[in-house]
Structures are given as structure tokens and as C-alpha cells.
Amino acid sequence: MSTRVIAVILLLFYSSPYASPFTAPASSPFLCRNPLSSQLRPRRRLNPLFETKEQSLDEVIRRVEEIGDTGLTKIGLAATSAEVEAVRLEYLGKKGSITSVMSQMRLFDADGKKMLGAKVNDVKKRVEEGLASQKESVRAREVMEEMAAEAVDVTLPGIRSSGPGRRHPLSMIIERAVDCFVRLGYDTVTECDDSPEIENDYYCFEALNCPPDHPARDMQDSFYLTEPDDPGMTWMLRTHTSAVQIHQMEKRKPPFRIVAPGRVYRRDDIDATHSMIFHQIEILAVEEKGKLTLGDLKGTVEYFLKQMFGPSIEVRFRGSYFPFTEPSMEVDVKFRGKWLEVLGCGMVDPRVLEKAGIDPEKFGGFAAGFGAERFAMVTHGIGDIREFYNGDVRFSEQFPHFGDQGMTAFLEGRKVE
């Protein structure tokens, strides 16, 4: 057979799709033929640290030791936390040098795998210990450097004060309002046990004669902490301080009078006149039936408003509706030429008394409530409720630091000494 014929036969054989991938020639050292296809596919590359399969077990183990020694040297040279982390990734990361050694295990028999695995684990442990030690040392040094950079020289002269601080307008309004009622014989209720900010549905709504379909009981209007349809007790952030009245009617025996200031929460969109957090002050008076009348309520409210806005303030009462009082009224004051709504009030509904364990045939009373922010905005001419919570000292510096007599002078436009 001629040389030319032999060459043709060999060529036909090697171009066949059934030719062995281990005998077929390749144009690249990294390509081989797929036994089911005539296309070339990449040949799997070896770990670049171990380029040949012919390395003996001793050579691989020696190479692992060299990797560990090099890693420990680099760890010792790492001067920052970032550098320590970079070394960790280089040696122990997914594609790290030590991690990659594990791919060589398949090249050896069971005894070889055991020896190589033990060596790799030993090197890995030494590197991990070195990293932990260096990381702790570096971090301690970095903390000391940060403390040195942020150190304050206490021997430097202090900053001169610009004057005495100012009280927040909300604090002054709440204190002044509470003092008005304390002078009338009301007890202040502010303790956490008596005035909790986390309430359940019963005290917030049911005991106050609010029907199940009342809008305030919707999830869109209240901050529920449990699902509203939970068969157990439903908890929420209280929507008004009226819940305090129920607690006190359950604890106290008539006659009694209370004033309850506190923080409340509602799911309002925040704007110039609405906030999700604000403050209310409520009063409740309960005595033997017939001793407290609608006239007593109107007299109490007028006295309070004149104490807050000055003796010449005009007050008007309008009929209204609240589920927990009957009859109910809304109260306006004519302030700086305009009628402004400032509070709501009414005689306590007999059903509310009955739910609290008080016999409505023997006792009666009245209640009133108002928002502290509303009073402060009207009193000081503040146009945006968000100013109360921004914490800007320039805001609080605009208001006088006054006592009881200073408020009247401030409202009348006289200079406060």
C-alpha cells in the first residue's frame, strides 16, 4: 500500500465523529474532540499552581507548605483591615490558593488523598489563626489611631454660651394647661401603668362606645401591632388619650377629677398641619348624678381658655357628635380676628360609664380634650407642625422663656422681662 493511500485512510479516521478524543490530533493543547460531535471543546485546565499531572504526592505537599509559608508572610505584612481581608480572599476564598489545592485530591489514591488532606487542613488552620491574630492586632491599632484623631483637647478654652436655653413651646403649653386644671382640683395622670401608649382595641374603641365600623378602627387610620381580625386581643399604638379615662374609671371610685396629657399616634400623611405623632390633653370629672351639668362643663372650658389665651378671648360652643359623650360640643375661640376650633367636649355617655363599671343612674360627668400642638400653633403663630419635631435650636430660640405671668404679657404683645 502506498504512502499516499495510508495518509488518506488516517485522515478519514481522525475526521470521523466517532474517533477517540484521546487519539485525535488537536490544533491546540487545550482542545479535544467530542466523541459525539466533530466540534472542538475546551480541555479542562489544571490548577495553575499545579500545571502538570505528573507531579508526585511529595511535590504537591511541598508546594502546599510553600503556599502556607508565603501566606503567613503576607499576613504579617498586612497593615490595614482591608489588606488582611485581601490576603484572606487570596488564600481562603472560593478561588484561593489553598482552596484550589483540593482539586488535586482526585489525582491520588486513598492513602495519598488522606496525606494531602491532612496537610491542607494543617496549612489552612495556620493561615486562619494568623489571619485572626493579625486582624485583631490591626483593628486595635486602627481604633487607637481613630481615638487619637478624634481626641478633644480639654485644656482648650470653652465656647462661650450665647445665653440661657429656651424651653420647647410644646412643653410650655402642656405644663400651662395641666396647671390650669390642677388649680381646679384635678389629679394629673401620667404614669406608664395609668397612661400606656400601647393599648388594646377595647380601651381605645369598644369601651368608648365606638362601633365596629368606626373609621378610626381601620388599619389605614391606626398603627396596629397585631392583625385587626385577630380573635384575641388586638394591640395598637393609642389613637387618643381618651383610653386613660376608661382605666381611671375602672380604678377610681366617684367622685374624682383627672387631667391626662400624653402622646398619641395616627396614620396621617405628614404635612404642615398633620403628623403621625402628636400630644393630647384630656380631662374627666365624675360625681353624683345632677352635681355636674352642661353649664359646669361650659364654665370649666371658658375658664381654661381664658387662662390660655387671655381674659378678653371670645369663646363659642357648637353642637357636635362624639361616640363617647352625649350631648357633645366643639369649641372655637376668636383669636387674632379669626374663629378657630380648639377643643371638643361633652357630657359622658351613660354607656361609657356602664362599661367602666360605674352606675349611670347614680353618677354622671363631663369630659374634654384638645391637641397641644394646635394650641401652640395658634398661640405662637406657627404655620408648620413639623417645626416642633425638627430639633432646630433656632426654632426654640424664637419663643420667650416665660413663667405664669409672662404668657399673658406675651399674648398681649408686651415685653417680657
Image (cartoon, rainbow, N blue to C red):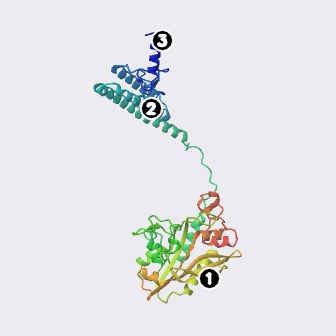
C-beta proximity under 8 Å, tags 3 and 1: no
Q: Which mark is residue 318?
A: 1
Q: Earlier in the sequence, mark 3 or mark 1?
A: 3
Sequence-wise first label, 1 or 2 = 2
Residue 188, visible in the rendered structure? no
Screen quadrant of the N terminus: top left
Q: Tag 1: residue type? A: Arg
- Secondary structure found at label 2: loop
Which residue is at the far left? 111
Pinpoint residue 136: horizontal percent, then vertical percent. Answer: 43, 36
The quarter of the image holding the C terminus is: bottom right
In front: label 3 or label 1 = 3
Residue 225 position in % (x across, y down) = 45, 64
Residue corresponding to mark 2: 95
The 10 Å Cα crowd at callout 3, few under 14, some 14 to 19, many 20 or more, is few
- Helix, strand or loop at label 1? It is strand
Label count reads 3
**Mark 2 or 3, nearer chain start:** 3
Rendering quarter of residue 251:
bottom left
Q: Residue at x 37, y 22 (%)?
A: 60
Which image quarter: residue 126? top left
In front of the other: 45 or 274: 45
Q: Is residue 33 left or right of residue 305?
A: left
Could you tell me residue 301's position as x and y percent?
58, 80
Label 3 residue SS: helix
Residue receiving disc 3? 4
